Amino acid sequence: MMTSKGRQLQLYTGGAAEPAAAAFSPADTLYAHANPDGSRKRCQACALWLVGLDQCWIHNPDVFVSGDMVCGYHVFGRPLTVAPVRENLDFVDPEFSGLTLVPGGSSCDTCAFYTPQGMTEGTCTALREGPAEEHPIVAALGCCTKWTPI
Ligand code: SF4
Ligand code: SF4
């Protein structure tokens, strides 16, 4: 079943009718390469997470955001220890950011669209059907907004 993170992509691409024959473009799904420290995508490894507060800087402080959540705006980095000024900040809506609880974090190698080809990479069938040789190569620890748990 597709998570809200996956549904978010449908908003970006204009609905459920996906261009099955279109060439894969990483930008279509906000594909992000593997985190440099080998971690999976999650708030605990995001530069916008607020340590100790269970908040995200770009979401409203009323929104509970644990370290095992993730959203489509993930930016790898060390979480914040002090909340930056939020004045004039227009908060991201969790319904649209795809904020989702994913224990352990998300990555291509835990995605239903992933077929491994070795330890560090594999192919993605999300946007292109057809012969396997036409499926784009993605990093095992990469991720995108179309991530769907196995
Ligand atoms: S909700 Fe998104 S942007 Fe905020 S800390 Fe988590 S991954 Fe980063
Ligand atoms: S395998 Fe899943 S998470 Fe990785 S690029 Fe494809 S759809 Fe996105």
Image (tube, grey):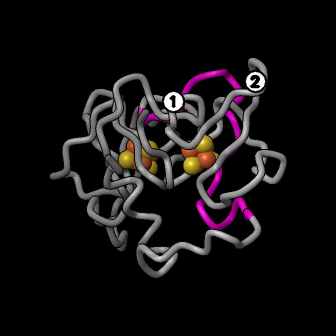
1 and 2 marks in contact (CB < 8 Å) = no
Looking at the image, is mark 1 or mark 2 earlier in the sequence? 1
Q: Is residue 15 left or right of residue 46?
A: left
Q: Residue at x 40, y 64 (%)?
A: 8
Residue 40 position, x and y percent, is 54, 28
The residue that mark 2 highlights is: 120
Residue 4 on the magenta segment: no
Q: Residue at x 45, y 34 (%)?
A: 42
For ligand 2, tell me if the residue under mark 1 lies within 8 Å. no
Q: Tally the marks.
A: 2
Question: Which one is in front, 129 or 142?
Answer: 129
Magenta span: 24-43
User: Which quadrant does the C terminus fall into?
Assistant: top left
What's under tag 1, amino acid-wise? Thr
Q: CA distance from mark 1 to mark 2?
A: 13 Å
Q: Residue furthest right?
A: 133
The secondary element bearing badge 1 is classed as helix
The residue that mark 1 highlights is: 110
* Residue 58 in view of the camera: yes
Residue 67 position, x and y percent, is 35, 29
What's under tag 2, amino acid-wise? Thr
Please, what is the dominant secondary structure of the magenta stretch? Answer: loop
Q: Mark 2 Cα within 10 Å, few/some/many (few <14, many 20+)?
A: few
The secondary element bearing badge 2 is classed as loop
Question: Which one is in front, 27 or 21?
Answer: 21
Residue 107 position, x and y percent, is 55, 34
Residue 125 position, x and y percent, is 64, 50
